[in-house]
Image (cartoon, rainbow, N blue to C red):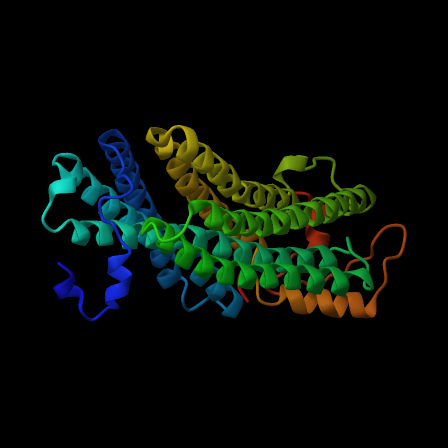
């Protein structure tokens, strides 16, 4: 058996006992295969819609809009690849369940397939949370720009919050990438019984802690800024409104943005819940692994949908320029905010929103 692997150090295979360890039971494999197949279909449809939408709007989309679609497509694509790796892993395990796998003549071949695809699936699944962190940082940056344009953030505070939050998300994303690579290497050694599992678990805990802390910082910052934004817009509306009929609070554009951003950030925490459930099922009830698999992919779907729904109300190319010009030229004065009559293309016309209380559309043409 070792002759067919003479391109690798013979000492490595001398330390491996292919009969050690266990493989997933048939019920776990069947449920996982069903879950993976279902989400491959759902995510493929979502990716198809994303690509079709991008092709349709390719002439209108600007740089940041393209980055949004690219990152969202990357997130969905990475999860699809992870699910495909899981299908191979569970399919191979299910094949071995129907036989006395310990007696298989090419047992090492089967075990190598299981080890490699299990590690790849784990690495790609963790890679999705790195992508989520980057997307959140990207959209938070645009949200802060919109809040600054609405004078919800002072000209002095705006750049500090903007760059501090952007740095936290990007550094966290890069750190997660390094930890994911180290975790994959250690996970492979654990699968090959060359390393105790207890030594690899801390890396996964560190990875999830980084992700959790970054999301908490994003959530706290977003909550404070969005509360201030809605207060300013609502107060300004009461000062300048000239119509008797007002658009309900929940139908206002800024309210929609806050609602969608809240849903996006909260859905990111599903990955933490899935990881905790995954640890519990691995330790106490491996046949219930489908629960954390299901929650993980569900979180990806919900997060991606929220990101796409934010395209029209939030994403525009000139919003950042408008905000930067605004906070550079004006301060945060008390009392009613004086608005210019001129509406910049591709940005929120705050005056028209407040004066008529009927315009719910946001121009996305830049």
State the residue at coordinates (65%, 42%). 255
Taking the spot 17% from the left edge, 35% from the top edge, the residue there is 97
Q: Quadrant of residue 75?
A: bottom left
Q: Quadrant of residue 298?
A: top left
Q: In the displayed structure, does residue 28 sit left or right of residue 298?
A: left
x, y percent for residue 284: 42, 29
Q: Is residue 249 above or below residue 138?
A: above
> On the picture, is 362 further left or further right than 4?
right
- At a point 78% along the width and 47% down the height, the residue shown is 232
Question: 42 or 228: which is nearer to us?
Answer: 42
> Can I make out residue 109 in this image?
yes
User: Which of the two residues, 211 or 69, is positioned nearer the viewer here?
Assistant: 211
| Image coords of residue 216 (percent x, y) | 65, 46
Q: Is residue 76 visible?
A: no
Q: Which residue is nearer to you in this view: 350 or 133?
A: 133
Q: Quadrant of the C terminus?
A: bottom right
Residue with the most extreme right position? 334
């Amino acid at each position: 058996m070792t002759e067919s692997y003479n391109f690798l150090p013979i000492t490595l295979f001398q330390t491996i006992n292919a009969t050690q360890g266990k493989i997933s039971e048939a019920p776990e494999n069947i449920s996982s295969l069903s879950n993976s197949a279902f989400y491959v279909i759902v995510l493929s449809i979502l990716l198809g819609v994303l690509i079709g939408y991008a092709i349709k709007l390719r002439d209108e989309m600007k740089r940041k809009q393209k980055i949004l679609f690219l990152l969202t497509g990357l997130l969905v694509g990475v999860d699809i690849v992870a699910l495909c790796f899981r299908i191979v892993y569970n399919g191979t395990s299910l094949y071995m369940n129907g036989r006395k796998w310990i007696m298989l003549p090419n047992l090492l071949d089967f075990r190598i397939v299981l080890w490699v695809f299990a590690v790849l699936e784990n690495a790609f699944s963790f890679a999705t949370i790195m992508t989520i962190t980057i997307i959140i940082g990207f959209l938070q940056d645009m949200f802060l720009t919109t809040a600054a344009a609405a004078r919800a953030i002072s000209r002095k505070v705006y750049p500090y919050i903007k760059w501090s939050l952007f740095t936290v998300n990007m550094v966290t994303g890069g750190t997660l990438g390094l930890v994911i690579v180290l975790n994959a290497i250690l996970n492979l050694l654990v699968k090959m019984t060359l390393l105790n599992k207890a030594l690899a678990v801390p890396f996964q805990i560190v990875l999830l802690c980084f992700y959790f802390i970054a999301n908490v910082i994003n959530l706290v910052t977003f909550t404070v800024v969005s509360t201030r934004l809605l207060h300013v817009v609502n107060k300004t509306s009461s000062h300048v409104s000239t119509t008797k009929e007002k658009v309900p609070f929940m139908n206002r554009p800024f309210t929609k943005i806050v609602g969608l951003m809240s849903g996006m950030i909260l859905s990111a925490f599903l990955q933490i819940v899935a990881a905790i459930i995954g640890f519990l099922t691995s330790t106490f009830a491996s046949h219930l692994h489908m629960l954390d698999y299901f929650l993980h992919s569900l979180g990806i779907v919900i997060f991606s949908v929220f990101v796409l729904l934010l395209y029209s109300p939030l994403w525009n190319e000139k919003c950042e320029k408008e905000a930067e010009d605004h906070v550079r030229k004006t301060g945060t004065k008390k009392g009613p905010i004086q608005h210019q009559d001129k509406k910049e293309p591709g940005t929120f016309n705050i005056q028209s929103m407040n004066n008529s209380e009927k315009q719910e559309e946001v121009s996305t043409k830049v």
